[in-house]
Image (spheres, rainbow, N blue to C red):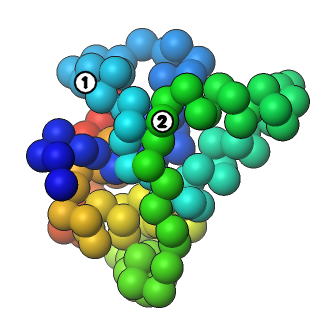
Amino acid sequence: MNDDLIVADASAILALLKKEPFRGFEPRRLFRAIISAVNFSEVIERLCSGGLTEAEADGTVAELDLQVADFGRTPARIAAHLRPRTRHAGLSLGDRACLALGLVLGRPVVTADRAWANLDVGADVILIR
């Protein structure tokens, strides 16, 4: 596996697509990132609810050439077990799916969600701002 590969949270992908400012992280690293199928679905849903057609949303995301990882038994179990340790930070299932995938793959996770900075769940968290 490429040592530069990262796991992307939906918030980071959406920030990239909205051309929001990044600090301390090169946005181009999100191209070809690994993303949980749960987070991938969240990105598409947000783009569509933001006014894009289904085809436009699919085309926009396709340009990033993301590697979509199935939300299988192991990451699903880990995401469930993360709930008690992340409840105080208000993490969603999508958030926990991203963290679980990072833990399964041993890759850092990239997010725009600052609440992740103080989590102690074993994942290497990279904040984009």
Q: How many marks?
A: 2
Mark found first going from the N terminus, 1 or 2:
1
* Residue 79 horizontal/vertical position (percent): 44, 76
Quadrant into which the N terminus falls: bottom left
Q: Is residue 91 visible?
A: no
Relative horizontal placement of residue 23, taking residue 9 as reference (left or right): left
Relative horizontal placement of residue 44, taking residue 100 as reference (left or right): right
Q: Residue 117: give its label.
A: none
Q: Residue 65: give its label.
A: 2
User: Disc 2 on helix, strand or loop?
Assistant: loop
The three-letter amino acid code for the residue at tag 1 is Phe
Question: Based on the displayed image, in which of its 4 quarters is residue 123 positioned?
Answer: bottom left
User: Disc 1 on helix, strand or loop?
Assistant: loop
The three-letter amino acid code for the residue at tag 2 is Asp
Report the residue at 37% width, 69% height from top: 100
Report the residue at 47% width, 86% height from top: 73
Q: Dots 1 and 2: beta carbons under 8 Å?
A: no
* Residue 27 horizontal/vertical position (percent): 35, 21
Residue mark closest to the camera, 1 vs 2: 2
Question: Based on the displayed image, in which of its 4 quarters is residue 129 positioned?
Answer: top left
Report the residue at 52% width, 72% height from top: 71
* Residue 37 horizontal/vertical position (percent): 56, 60
Measured in 3D between alpha carbons, the distance from the residue under mark 1 to the one under mark 2, in whole angstroms, is 19 Å
Q: Circle 2: is it few (<14), some (14-19), or many (20+) Cα within 10 Å?
A: few
Q: Is 122 above or below relative to 1? A: below
Q: Is residue 122 visible?
A: yes
Q: Is 118 above or below relative to 72? A: above
The residue identified by callout 1 is 25
As drawn, the residue found furthest toward the left would be 3
Q: Circle 1: is it few (<14), some (14-19), or many (20+) Cα within 10 Å?
A: some
Report the residue at 69% width, 29% height from top: 59
* Residue 99 horizontal/vertical position (percent): 36, 62
